[in-house]
Amino acid sequence: MLFEMQPPFTTFMSVESTRAYIDNLYSSDPEKCLTSIVCIKNSVIGSNRQKESVIAQGIVPRLLQLLQDRNTKSMLRIEAAITVGSLAKGTNEHVEILINSGTIQLLLNTLEENEPQLIDACLSCLRTLSQSDSPQNKIDVKRLHKLLTFAGPGESLRRQACVASIMGSACKTPVEQNELCAMGAPNLLAALLSVQNSSVRIPVLACLASMCWNNQNVANMVANTTYKDVKVSSILATLIGRDRPIEMQLEAARCLTNLHRAGAISSNDPIITYRTLPCLVRLCQTEHSEGNRASAANTLAYLTEVDSDLQQVAAISNQLVSALVNLLSCRSVAARQAAFRAFASLAANDEDIRKRIIDTKCLMDSVLEGLDDENEDIRLAAVRCLHSLSRSVQQLRTTFQDHSVWRPLMALLTGCPSTELLTAASSALCNLLLEFSPAKEPMLQQGVVQLLATLTIRPEPSLRLNGVWALMNLAFQAEQRVKSQILTALGTDQIFRLLADSDTRVLMKTLGLLRNLVSPRTHTDTMMSLHGPQVMQGVVLVLEGPHSPEVKEQALCILGNIADGEKAREHIMSNEDVLKKLIDYMTHPAPCLQEASVFCINNLSRLGEPGSLERQTRLKEMGVVNILQQLLSTSDTVLYNRVKTALTQFTDV
Amino acid sequence: MCALTRSSGIPPLCEFDRMLLGLTNGTIARLFTSIFLNQNVAAGGGVLVVCYMMNYVGHGKTHRDAASVQATHPIPAACGLYYFEVKIVSKGRDGYMGIGLSAQGVNMNRLPGWDKQSYGYHGDDGHSFCSSGTGQPYGPTFTTGDVIGCGVNLIDNTCFYTKNGHHLGTAFTDLPPNLYPTVGLQTPGEVVDANFGQEPFVFDIEDMMRELGTRTRMEINDFPVPESHGEWQAILNKMVSTYLVHHGYCNTAEAFAHITEQPFNEDIVSIKNRQKILKLVLAGRMGEAIERTSRLYPGLLENNQNLLFMLKCRQFVEMVNGSDVEICHRKSGYSPSYSVSPRPSSPIQTSVIQSTKNYSNKSKQTVEEMNQNNTTTTTAPTHNGSSCNEVPVILTDDGDVEMDTTEEYRNGHGDACNGKTNNSTNGYQNGNSHNNNVTQDGECCDNEDEDMDVDVPVCRKSCSKPAVERILEFGRELYSMSQRLTVDKGSSETNQKMLEDAFSLLAYSNPWASPVGWQLQPSQRESVCASLNSAILESNKKPRKPPLEVAIAHAHELVKLMSTSGLGSCAFASLVEILDQ
């Protein structure tokens, strides 16, 4: 295009003469108008400054008007579309202005017309605009259908490439994924994969990856699609080869990763273990460009996130750990974020890998720096990495302690982090507050209890869960003062609210917290003398609620712990209602509830403790012994042993 | 101390892909004072061999009790990428095993990696040892059941390992040349089994080879050209056009010059004349070719008696073949009654065979088969006692077909592919080529050729002398010429050999099936054709060989030189592949 620059262009550069050309744009004479557009088009190519200038002069609405008007000469409309397309390649602000002017809809409307050159220009422009993350960048189903027709086998390579790009970025939610799938996109895209042209194949791969992401139905459809009797997964396996362009390998690997994570390809399929994984690991190596490495590390993180076999293979592959450490030292946010994510995935399950990662030079320092980074995304990725690494008992006691990891973590939590960051940070906190963790004490002094208590009143279930979970860990075998601190900070009202929480996981952890609070034996009496009625009320609340046996088991376990306390057990004995419930659960169909209730009865009736005979008599009156004897016939060995032990308590039987 | 035996059940002999070939000339491991090798090796097809199982039987108390085994031949740089795998059959007592590379003369009583010019990856700690007693953390440990691979990239001079098919990353860089694959064991009970490619590898080495191939091709394609792009392009265009002119592709050369906007000032008439002569040679009509050459290029053959002798020898062969006819009787034997419709008079069946024979010229695989066809049908009449006259008559017609079809080959071929019957193809071909010839000849210098196609079969019919007699007569002339050559230019062994081969054809009742029958193959005409073409060009003060062919030959030599100089890229610098692109 630059070669076509016309003589006026040279003078056009000066602002004064600009006006004349811009003015001509509004001329009703098509010739003048066309000359003006061509001039503008040539001036803005490759120059953000010129784009800025002409946009500031308000030409966008006029261009769109020309483009939209079916009465305008098609040559003029084509030039207008090309110029808009060029402007769309400017800065984010320029793109935003175009999108806010309704350009996307307008271009989509134009596609309905039958003017090949105009359609080509519109598709190119749409492709450029589709790369932005604007929420307005949505394409409805009918339009998708139309777009799909421009990617047929007979269409030009350019059109196919454009449509694949546009669809790939439009495909964001399950709605679009399913729609595209229903329209037959998998077959069409599979056919396009055989086009011997990278500029078509790469966006097609990206589009397939977007379609399959987290969508099992679509992923299965795609995986089972064949083109000329070759399955898509096999085509992908060839496109991932070392001799292909890097971008193609990356996109093919992303596609296979998404197919795997959506459940369409198993993790022990050689395509995943011997093709996808090694490819991604290789692309993380230092010889590749930073952007590609970041992208590969990101995909690798997703691929290995949950599967420990893949984590193990990745950890030994191609010196991945040192490649990722190197990636951490890169400048770009994407690179560091991806490296942290990959480390988080690798360290998720395996202690050996965790140790190897942490033993890598300066890694912990990088993580701590990451926690402090000015960029929120990096902080988040670093916290997730820390969370993954914190699953190790040994590391908690050593490296984490040496680096006082708790300090930056507390700083993060007390700042005002986003929900996502807070969730990740509090997850890591849960591990740091485990009983054996040396970080526990200093964090208590920093007021972690209060902080966690406030988490439990957050509207987000994940935050409530982490708050209660951390408190539960904190309360485990804790000193009396810590327990009191927890109860004071939380308040009984809040405990009741948590016991009525809609999220079962929160409920379970709350019951766990209560259990930890009333045990061991030495603490039971004190805790019950202070909060006895409330605890009992809470337990009854749960036992009467419509909960699963697992939840009720926890409640019965609390009763078991209470029954262990010399004075505390009176809270049960004096409560006819609770006793009846307890006895009912002895014959409950769920074995876990039977076991828990028998355990509790055993504690209540234990010989050699003050008042044991009275309690035994009372229990006998309620028919406990008979029930126990009936239970002897059980085939469940755990239950049988418990019943046996309980029966030995009753002396005169 | 360490016994080495071939593992049973594995075939002792196998041919490797040349890229993976490490040990050449049928060998196994070198013998060392304390290591006994029990081997059974033979070379096959120039390439060889090897599979063995190593079993440590020493006492293994200290690191000095280690025993390593080296392959007998170093890794050839020319293979580009070398790879072998070792399966750990048993880790023995402590699993102190080392897999790697070492130079000649390295102490074989120690694991690879510990000494100078020795490199290894050890199973007990997973460390890599680069000519040093202390290792670097490298990969996982390995033990019974694992398959460890060792790869050497001879382009970058790096080494990597694999474990159970997973690439472990680069272990060593800047490797010296001429390293030997080496495996070392140290404690009792350690057994390993090496795979040099006789079985499929666990690791996907093919993928890596494809990558290196692509990389090398890209490097070649992206190689910076000297000076400005325009000049470079001009040189390339010139090379192409000289090639076309050299081989007489006149119209193509003109079209090419037109498209690339080069001046085209070659002498078209001269090219066309040359093309005509070459066509005659390729059609086996040597007599006419010689006659025309001496007419158009007087003095050429007179001054180049060896060439003339070669042409005449070929003519003799073609006479046996039935493709050549002495044209001197042509005019006298002219008969209008035959010239009206000469085509139907010749049996179509023979034409079919000949046209396929012509086809076989291009696709070598079928030459054998076609020749057999040829043999059976064309020689049958002789055996059946038909007159000798008939044979050449039929075959002369074939000569025509062939000559015409050399140019029209594509046409005919395309039709055959369309599934038409051979008969119709043939008819079409004949007719078509004939027409074409007319139009072409229209622009040509002499029009007497016009009649040639029609006349020849006629003249055959009216020929009075039996063919065999004429062949014998011609043979006598040829012999006396060879005598003259010996006197004039000294005895030339080549000429003598050529003559003997040609005369030998007469000794067989079925020359096509005889040991010297290869001479009758149409493909043999090509070298004669090339020699004549070169001679004509040389006489016109033009190069014997077009620059394009010189460049290709040069490139071939350079790749050979790379190989002998130890440049690994040569394994992937395949000229044929690049030309095919």
Image (cartoon, coloured by chain):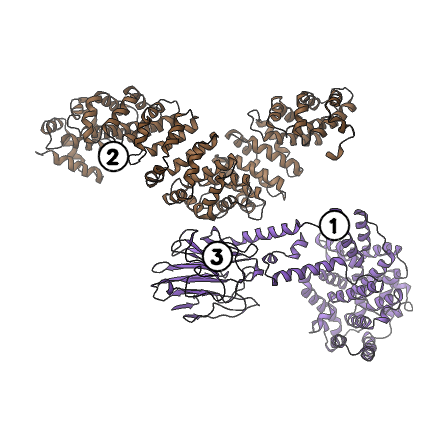
Colour in which chain B is drawn: purple
**Kind of residue at disc 3:** Cys
User: Is the same chain shared between marks 2 and 1?
Assistant: no
Position of residue B578 in the picture relative to residue B459 (left or right) = left
Mark 2 vs mark 1, CA separation in Å: 87 Å
* Residue B232 badge: 1
**Kind of residue at disc 2:** Pro
**Residue linked to disc 2:** A591
Question: Looking at the image, is mark 3 or mark 1 nearer the viewer?
Answer: 1
Mark 3 vs mark 1, CA separation in Å: 43 Å
Which quarter shows the N terminus of chain A? top right
Q: Residues within 10 Å of mark 2 (few under 14, many from 20)?
A: some
Q: Tell me, yes or no, if residue B247 can be seen here.
A: no
Q: Nearer the viewer, residue A140 or A98?
A: A98
Q: Tell me, yes or no, if residue B245 can be seen here.
A: yes
Judging from the image, what secondary structure is the residue with disc 3 in? Answer: strand
Judging from the image, what secondary structure is the residue with disc 2 in? Answer: helix
Colour in which chain A is drawn: brown
Q: Position of residue A358 (x, y in %)?
A: 40, 42
- The residue that appears at 36% across and 67% down in the rendered structure is B58
Position of residue A113 in the picture relative to residue A560 (left or right) = right
Query: Who comes first in sequence, dot 3 or dot 1?
Result: 3
**Residue linked to disc 3:** B150
